[in-house]
Amino acid sequence: MSTITIAQHSAQPLTVNRLGYGTMRLTGPDIWGEPADRSQALAILNKAVASGVNFLDTADYYGEDVTNRLIAEALHPYPADLVLCTKVGATRRPDKSWVPFNTPENLRTSIDNNLRTLRREQIQLVHLRLMGHGAVPLEEQLGAMFELQREGKILHVGLSNVTREELETGLQLGAIATVENMYGYAQRTTLQLPYGVNTGGEEVLDLCEQHGIPLIPFFSLVHGLPNAGDKLTGLAQQRGVTPAQLNIAWLLHRSPWILPIPGTSSLAHLQENLKATDMKLSAEEMAYLG
């Protein structure tokens, strides 16, 4: 795999292989509860890391706490090059709804919980997920994150579900290491979902490139592929690959600053996703896909 560097201008940059793994799909239905097949979930984590994946994306509100505990069970003590990235700013209610959890006190509680469940003294990268835009000022949320960074609980701070304006504001407030937005071949812009708005990656990609900030796409395989259209499906058939594999290859070719993190609860699909890193798309094929 090719590599990408997070926080390249900092004193402690992190270089990772350019296909990560998003753990959200390891939970039960509705991203809630334990996995249907716990042994396979643990096997997926071990296989991913053994295959060169050294960037794992998680959150304590997946499950809740399910993916963090699975990661620790499968991989602790962690390989030296493994980067664990978590998210704060949201929580779950017993009815499985998603709600903001983003006051400074909330964020500190979430960080402490992530440290405990991941069995770490410091988390290398934490994304502040923006929910309920405006309810708690961004300046107040990021101020709390940077305070936790100064205390040594966080190494690098990123933003998730962020608009262009919010990213510009964040860059004025401090060092933003990464951005995690929804992005895939067929779903590049903002999407309204039952639990809230997911901001697309297209509106911030050029800003990320200008500042050397990796863009980490989430939901690249969930919402995009059913509406991908004939171009992606047709080219996938011609290449003898799945649309999901072609979507990952498209992301890798779209910009060197994109770090895909496709998730799956299937060991077979994980292996398919890994093979996408070997695909080469010509300039003509990228122009055809658009």
Image (tube, rainbow, N blue to C red):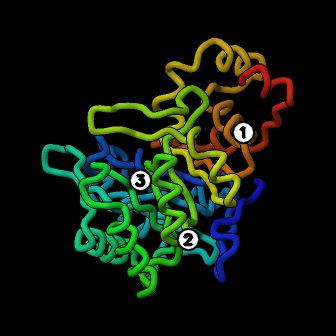
Q: CA distance from mark 2 to mark 1?
A: 24 Å
Sequence order check: which comes first, mark 2 or mark 1? Answer: 2
Foreground pick, 44 / 181: 181
Q: Circle 2 is placed at which residue position?
A: 175
Check disc 1: other Cα within 10 Å, few if <14, some if 14-19, many if 20+: some
Q: Residue at x 29, y 52 (%)?
A: 134
- Relative to 204, is 61 above or below? below
Q: Please, what is the three-letter code of the amino acid marked with disc 2?
A: Ala
Which residue is outermost to the bottom? 151
What amino acid type is highlighted by mark number 1? Arg
For the residue pair 256 and 34, the one nearer the viewer reads as 256
* Residue 220 spot, x, y in % from top left: 53, 37
Q: CB under 8 Å between callouts 3 and 2?
A: no
* Amino acid found under the numbered disc labelled 3: Ser
Classify mark 3: helix, strand or loop: helix
Q: Which mark is residue 254?
A: 1
Of residues 53 and 142, the one drawn nearer to the viewer in this rendering: 142
Q: Residue furthest left?
A: 94
- Image coordinates of residue 261 in percent, x first then y, are 56, 49
> What residue sits right under mark 3 in the picture?
39
Query: Would you call the spot at circle 3 few (<14 residues within 10 Å), some (14-19), or many (20 or more)?
Result: few
Q: Is residue 285 visible?
A: yes
Give the SS element for disc 1: helix
In the rendered image, the vertical position of residue 223 relative to residue 130, given as above or below? above
- Residue at screen point 67% across, 60% down: 211
Query: Quick one: SS at disc 2?
Result: loop
